[in-house]
Amino acid sequence: MVEKNAGGVQSVERVLDLLEAMVRSGGPMSLSELAEASSLPLPTIHRLLRTLTGRSYVRQLSNRQYALGPRLIPLGEGAGEQLGAFVQPELARLVAALSETANMAVHDGDKVLYISQVPSPHAMRMFTEVGQRVPMHNTGVGKAILAQLDDDAVRRIIDRAGMPAATERSMTTLDELLEDLRVTRERGYAIDDNEQEIGVRCFAVAVPGSPTPAAVSVSGPISRVDGGFGKRAVPLLRRAASAIGAELS
Amino acid sequence: MVEKNAGGVQSVERVLDLLEAMVRSGGPMSLSELAEASSLPLPTIHRLLRTLTGRSYVRQLSNRQYALGPRLIPLGEGAGEQLGAFVQPELARLVAALSETANMAVHDGDKVLYISQVPSPHAMRMFTEVGQRVPMHNTGVGKAILAQLDDDAVRRIIDRAGMPAATERSMTTLDELLEDLRVTRERGYAIDDNEQEIGVRCFAVAVPGSPTPAAVSVSGPISRVDGGFGKRAVPLLRRAASAIGAELS
DNA sequence: AATAATATATCCATAATGCGGAAATCGACA
DNA sequence: TGTCGATTTCCGCATTATGGATATATTATT
């Protein structure tokens, strides 16, 4: 044995490495690019990809490059549903206590993906939709997730995604954002104050120990969601986040 | 050798079988349920799941049941993007020729998932969003996909999903739907005529040879999308669908 | 067009890897 | 506390995946 292995099935671990490399690259990859990314011998990669293409989890373009295949889509959808189903009751408890819309979102590339939502009983409420992807720099969940990364990682994400302003309250420079994240880390929760949409305020807490970074939030109109609301909401958000985190780890 | 193997890496094939079983079940599964679904020995399944849980592609609940894990979500998203990126130019050609919104969708569970869209240049246009999931029985893409299945498979889907009416033109009985699908198969393309939304008509063609069933469509207001439009649209849709199908296979 | 250079795909002998029967452990229920 | 069904760990065996070497495509060069 050349290296110790953490008890996983080798070929499965390698397949996962390959798929992750393909997600990271964001586009089709050639065999040799994959070899470099994974430091595995070419024949091995080829054989594994052959297995995946045979099942449509990877498809080979006419360039002979490889891309993620359509069969992965139902897998991702299914995972989202199953996760959402578990998270739903926790969010429902938040809504029962606070009467504002509760969301859970996960980090996905340079954006944040909503995977679960329980709407507020109020007529005027938030309208985010499960499956929607929103920027990281001007949303509560996005900033809660960013605050868990170090400044360099944040910089890379913003380099790629930019900082489009959604409202006049949105932050537009990296320095502003990094300072806001510093405050967020210290305080332990993130606030979106009219940054994503005028008239809306949002409190968000990161899910601790989640494998893909995630966060939960409650949001509503500023008339109801004020400082006093925050005082009541944050401890509940913390509890919900750690309950979810405990189940995920 | 007890059985012939199609040249794939055994443990990888088995992992895919397990994940697919978990998607089909739609909820958490116990080890023994997985054993029954996959006809593999328990220790083997356990070892494979251990590898997957170690990487967060599967998570184990406190019940000791297993569910699809959060790491699958970015995979599915990435696959959707990479597929969409390739499909985009084909859809753009359709829009250039027809000036109506073009969509591509894949079969996902009991619904249809939009994975790519190019909007019409007209001010009045369709508003479907990528990532949205819509019913199968009252959409063009949905019916094009259903028409490729046999009646029993259709029946099972409708049994689970029901046939909620979106408009007064929506079909609401299985028999109506099966008859419509028979016509669709004969004709070679599907029509959604005010069934999903009043004032909107849609022509759709299945993507041939796609591993996950898929379809492309163009849709717009009935004032522009009439019989004459269909005559021009269908051959172009066919060409786009087979171009996409060729690349996917 | 012909040739070289590079990247991709296939073979196949080897042993390392994953396999699964058997046994231990855990957890639910009485 | 004892029993039963399910889950998890153990470990010797041989089946399975491995990767160096080789053949075959594909692209670049003259």
Image (spheres, coloured by chain):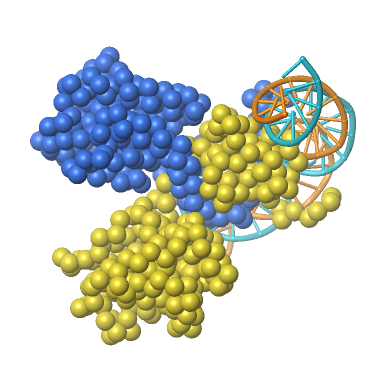
Chain colours: A blue, B yellow, C orange, D cyan
The residue shown at (40%, 62%) is B135
The residue shown at (63%, 36%) is B49
Residue A62 is situated, as x and y percent measured from the top left of the image, at 50, 60
Position of residue B33 in the picture relative to residue A69 (left or right): right
Residue A132 is situated, as x and y percent measured from the top left of the image, at 32, 46
The residue shown at (27%, 24%) is A233
Residue B40 is situated, as x and y percent measured from the top left of the image, at 74, 44
Position of residue B113 in the picture relative to residue B246 (left or right): left
Position of residue B77 in the picture relative to residue B28 (left or right): left
Count numbered badges in the picture: 0
Position of residue B93 in the picture relative to residue A87 (left or right): left
Q: Is residue A120 above or below residue A27?
A: above
Residue B172: image quadrant is: bottom left
Between A235 and B48, which is closer to the camera in this rendering? A235
Between A11 and A83, which is closer to the camera in this rendering? A83
Q: Quarter holding the C terminus of chain B? A: bottom right
Residue B36 is situated, as x and y percent measured from the top left of the image, at 70, 47
Q: Is residue B173 above or below residue D3?
A: below
Between B139 and A224, which is closer to the camera in this rendering? A224
The residue shown at (13%, 36%) is A199
Q: Is residue B94 above or below residue A107?
A: below
Q: Is residue A188 above or below residue D5?
A: above
Residue B113: image quadrant is: bottom left
Q: Is residue A156 visible?
A: no
Q: Is residue A225 visible?
A: yes
Residue sticking out furthest to the left: A168
